[in-house]
Amino acid sequence: RGNPGELPVVELGQLGTHVAGPRQHADELAQGAHLLDGLHLLEEVLKREVLALRALLRHALGQFAERCEPGVSLLEAARAAEADARRNGGFWSRAKVALGPTPYTIPPEPGETMPADEVVTCELVTESPLGYWTEMTMHVVCGDVPDETARLFDAYFAASAAAMALARPGVSQGEIGR
């Protein structure tokens, strides 16, 4: 409840998790108190957290891409990305890879190396100090991009741009997907 001249405060922990009557319980605890809506503060913290995580993952995946040369160990490139993510604020991180056009990424095996002229997908997952898990994926090619792969990526980028142009409040996922 606080001292005279201070805003009375009700701790959210006091509200509990009641199956029946949570509104009545909240009203009883809050009698005479001013309830403040702090959601805008939480939204600002989360926005900053997401932007920081994106920057962290982009930088860490850059460490993977810098090692993209035929014959380089996939495991060492993945470990470099993981270490960079942790060094820059990730609580933990895990890199997985896929060779070729498959969407299934797995941890790299010792002895696996970067192939020439083939797509390597690196998926990096990390957890922020606030506990949010974030994932980012990067595709790299060591050498020349095969024509079929270039065609698929061009189609993907065109579809993504079209979807982003349509995405706005009130537009359903179905409408965007058509």
Image: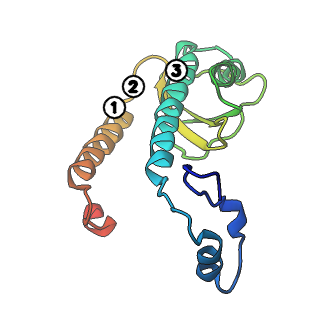
Label 2 residue SS: loop
In the image, is 73 to the left or to the right of 30? right
Gap in angstroms between the C-alphas marked 1 and 2: 6 Å
State the separation of the CA atoms marked 3 and 1. Answer: 28 Å
Left or right for 33, reference 74: left
Q: Is residue 32 above or below residue 9?
A: below
Q: Which of the pair 44/96 is nearer the observer?
A: 44
Q: Secondary structure at mark 1?
A: helix
The amino acid type of the residue labelled 1 equals: Asp
Q: CA distance from mark 2 to mark 3?
A: 23 Å
Question: Residue 120, can we see it?
Answer: no
User: Residue 25's quadrant in the figure?
Assistant: bottom right
The 10 Å Cα crowd at callout 3, few under 14, some 14 to 19, many 20 or more, is some
Q: Determine whether label 2 and label 3 are within 8 Å by CB.
A: no
x, y percentage for residue 7? 54, 53
| Circle 2 crowding by C-alpha within 10 Å: few under 14, some 14–19, many from 20 | some
Say whether disc 2 or disc 3 marks the residue closer to the N-terminus: 3
Question: Label 2: which residue?
Answer: 145
| Residue at 47% across, 45% down | 41
Q: Nearer the viewer, residue 52 or 35?
A: 35
Q: Which residue is identified by label 1? A: 147
Q: Which residue is mark 3?
A: 59
Measuring from the top left, give residue 124's x and y in whole percent: 60, 34
Q: Are marks 1 and 2 in contact (CB under 8 Å)?
A: yes
Q: Residue furthest front?
A: 4
The residue closer to the viewer here, 128 or 84, is 128
